[in-house]
Image (cartoon, rainbow, N blue to C red):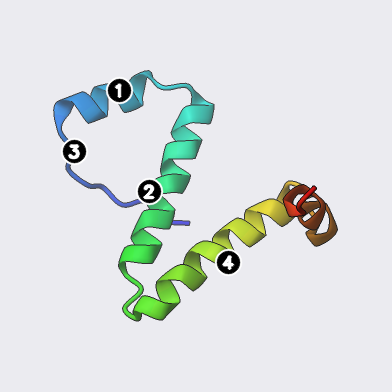
Amino acid sequence: MSTLAIRVDDLVREKFQQASQQEKARWEEAFNLWWRIYFTEEPNQKLGVVVDYFRQKSAERGLTQEALDELLKDE
């Protein structure tokens, strides 16, 4: 991963600097996903980028397809 310096307003900078390491990591992850989607040119690919991202995160956190199916099934 690389670092990119961008300009933000003072309040955003202040709030980010005050955030915990865990919050900063979440914000960096969210911005990274947003930019990835933004720079995907094909509209059909934008959804795929989001789906792939959440599929990867779910797998990293141990959510299997079977567990997801169980959570989503109608009772």
Element marked by disc 1: helix
In the rendered structure, which disc, 2 or 4, sits on the residue that comes first in sequence?
2
Tell me what residue is drawn at x 50 percent, y 72 percent: 48
Q: Residues within 10 Å of mark 1 (few under 14, many from 20)?
A: few
Could you give the CA–CA distance between mark 2 and mark 4, rounded to whole angstroms?
16 Å
The three-letter code of the residue at mark 4 reads Asp
Residue 25 % position (x, y): 49, 37
Residue labelled with disc 4: 52
Q: Residues within 10 Å of mark 4 (few under 14, many from 20)?
A: few
- Would you say the residues marked 1 and 3 are in contact, meaning their CB atoms lie under 8 Å apart? no
Tell me what residue is drawn at x 47 percent, y 46 percent: 29
Q: On screen, 17 above or below 47? A: above
Could you give the CA–CA distance between mark 1 and mark 2, rounded to whole angstroms?
15 Å
Q: On screen, 55 above or below 27? A: below
Could you give the CA–CA distance between mark 1 and mark 3, rounded to whole angstroms?
11 Å
Q: Which of the labelled discs sits on residue 29, or is there none?
A: none
- Would you say the residues marked 3 and 2 are in contact, meaning their CB atoms lie under 8 Å apart? no
Residue labelled with disc 3: 8
> Which of the two discs, 3 and 4, sits closer to the camera?
4
Residue labelled with disc 1: 15
- Would you say the residues marked 2 and 4 are in contact, meaning their CB atoms lie under 8 Å apart? no
In the rendered structure, which disc, 3 or 2, sits on the residue that comes first in sequence?
3
The three-letter code of the residue at mark 1 reads Lys
Element marked by disc 2: helix
Residue 30 % position (x, y): 43, 46
In the rendered structure, which disc, 3 or 4, sits on the residue that comes first in sequence?
3
Q: Residues within 10 Å of mark 2 (few under 14, many from 20)?
A: few
